[in-house]
Amino acid sequence: MLRYITQRVLYMILTLLIIATITFFLMKLLPGSPFNNQDKLTETQRYALNEKYGLNDPVPVQYINYITKLAQGDLGYTFQFDGRTVNSLIVNGMGPSATVGFEALLFGTIVGLLLGIMAALKHNTFLDYGAMVIAVFGIAIPSFVFAGLLQYYVGVKLQWLPVAFWNGPEYHILPAFSLSVGVIATVARFMRTEMLEILGTDYILMARSKGVSKSAVIFKHCVRNSLIPIVTILGPMAIGLITGSLVIENIFAIPGIGEQFVKAIQVNDYPVIMGTTLFFSFLIVAIILIVDILYGIIDPRIRVAGGKS
Amino acid sequence: MSMSERKLTPDLFRPANLDSNRAEEISKPSLSFWQDAFRRLKQNKGAMLGLFAIAFIIVFSLIAPTFTKYDIDDQELMRANLPPKIPGLEKVEFLGVNGVDIRDVNQYEMKNVPKDDYFWFGTDSLGRDQWTRVWKGTQISLYIAFLASAIELIIGVAYGGISAFYGGRTDDIMQRIVEVLVGIPNLVVIILFIIILDPGILSITLALVITGWIGMSRIVRAQIISLKNREFVLASKTLGSTNGRLISKHLLPNTLGAIIVTSTFTIPGAIFFESFLSFIGLGIQPPIASLGSLIADGFRSIRIYPHLAIYPASVLCILMISFNLLGDGLRDALDPKMRR
């Protein structure tokens, strides 16, 4: 197991290094610099600015400087605001982003589990079909479309909830709900399949024939055993949440990392683009790693296979 | 007992055919794998609905722009932001297609639009016909999705196939490469790629392909590895088949099911990513439009002109749901063991 974890961590570092390299050189390939548009700058001023941000050095030197700083966790300075570091932008944005993400994850998982359990217990009834229709819709409809419609109908037409911004608990409801739709659908579908499989196993039959009460059979035996494989979909779900947060934060004007990222793209702020890209990559790669290790620990059957690959 | 209720009379029985020459005869018409799969698919109402919806949208996206006399970039500021108006249906109040906007002003009368001019989905802020733009946008979204999926399919099948078929060191090296690549989040690569290349149909397609083929190659590799050592392949090899024949006659046809199912899921994935990119401003640039860019433009003015976002969003949702339904149905039909 230890060997497996070490190997995976090494792969993770290699992946991150490759991403950092690709990002760096792609950014260098981009035409123009962030100071080109400001015509008011004199030649000397521009030179001084370039010097300050290290843009006058040859590219290989810049690359080595970048990687060395990166290894120390320093993502450099943003071009947009004087003297602010990318780290501080990310740290500032992390609060709202993480809050929305966790709220969506929590709400989505609970509702998804309930829907999935209900669908499996009432298999092939109206409830089951209803839950599965919701699931297909949730998987198919992009979260930004859902968010936009929700914003229009609940925020603008009915005026039940604030349309945008981030000033208190009631501002969390719409964005968190729009983000959670995908989670609800994925979890509900997965839970239903798992539950149906486990309901048909011999040990459930055994428990029933022993005279265990129906609720004990469902909650102690079925649900608990169905929950194990759900760890596997956590990775893809986290990626979906991050992708979704990019647009959801824009639609609802939440001051999170996703919003910073999109803004940075629009104004060619290289360090912010590189920094957030790396941050997202690190997040995703780390989540996948943790999920894989967690799964190996929870389910002994995977450990053997996992140790090999 | 039910047995005793039904009297068994000798004339219910018929002597079995003992002719040894006809013992092997199959009395039912034999169904090939594909006929059988199609039969199963037809029983799945959701999948058939999805199939018809997709066919309808494809056909409509091709012929619908010819229904009106306006092209995708015919601007006329005099008729900007008109709400939808459809002949015939304009009499039905609650449909909201009578040319009256949300403040109860008949924009068509106010802006002196000729009586026989109908904009079925209204017009956008530059006075361009939204009907033409929505269907042309659908065309472009579908084009990108199909093109990206087709290229992904070719690269994925080739890579996965070679890796699995030759095995050994080739497989080792190719899989190590994939292992590193698969760790890179596709969102990040796609966005970086679009920033470097100018946003356009080709660059979006390329960006989608660059990360998309890995999933396909892994599925093909897993399938071929499991098929490679099966008896029928060994038999064919023993009889002296060349590698080419083994691949084209035995391995690929048996992998086709999985390939088709994967493709039906990569298409909605591509449609989603394309509209996502357009939404954050990295997608299709004006004057042409895609569903995503239309939705993004529409959401900007959704409070006053909801029609601009609603129609492209509906088309996008129907497309996505249909492809997902069809994919689920195909998976059940082609691989009964995988049934979920």
Image (cartoon, rainbow, N blue to C red):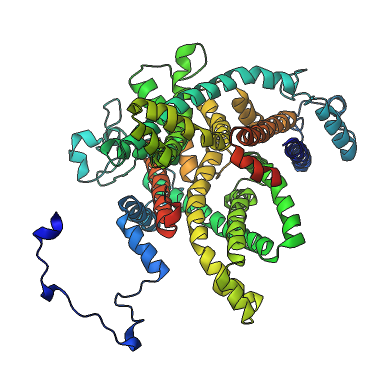
Residue lying at 33% horizontally and 81% vertically, measured from the top left:
B25
Viewer-proximal residue among B255 and A67:
B255
Residue lying at 10% horizontally and 71% vertically, measured from the top left:
B9
Q: Is residue A288 above or below residue A173?
A: below
Among all residues in the image, which is located at the extreme top?
Answer: A168
Viewer-proximal residue among A41 and A47:
A47
Image-quadrant location for residue B336: bottom left
Return the x and y of residue A76 as percentages of the image width and height: 79, 25
Left or right: residue A277 versus residue A207 is right
Residue lying at 65% horizontally and 79% vertically, measured from the top left:
B242
| Residue B220 visible within the image | yes
Q: How many marks?
A: 0
Viewer-proximal residue among A286 and A200:
A200
Left or right: residue B238 versus residue B84 is right
Q: Is residue B129 above or below residue A246?
A: below
Residue lying at 67% horizontally and 41% vertically, measured from the top left:
B192
| Residue B80 visible within the image | no
Return the x and y of residue A308 as percentages of the image width and height: 70, 46
Q: Quadrant of the N terminus of chain A?
A: top right
Q: Is residue B206 above or below residue A9?
A: below
Return the x and y of residue A155 as percentages of the image width and height: 39, 21
Return the x and y of residue B145 as percentages of the image width and height: 51, 52
Image-quadrant location for residue A285: top right
Left or right: residue B296 versus residue A302 is left
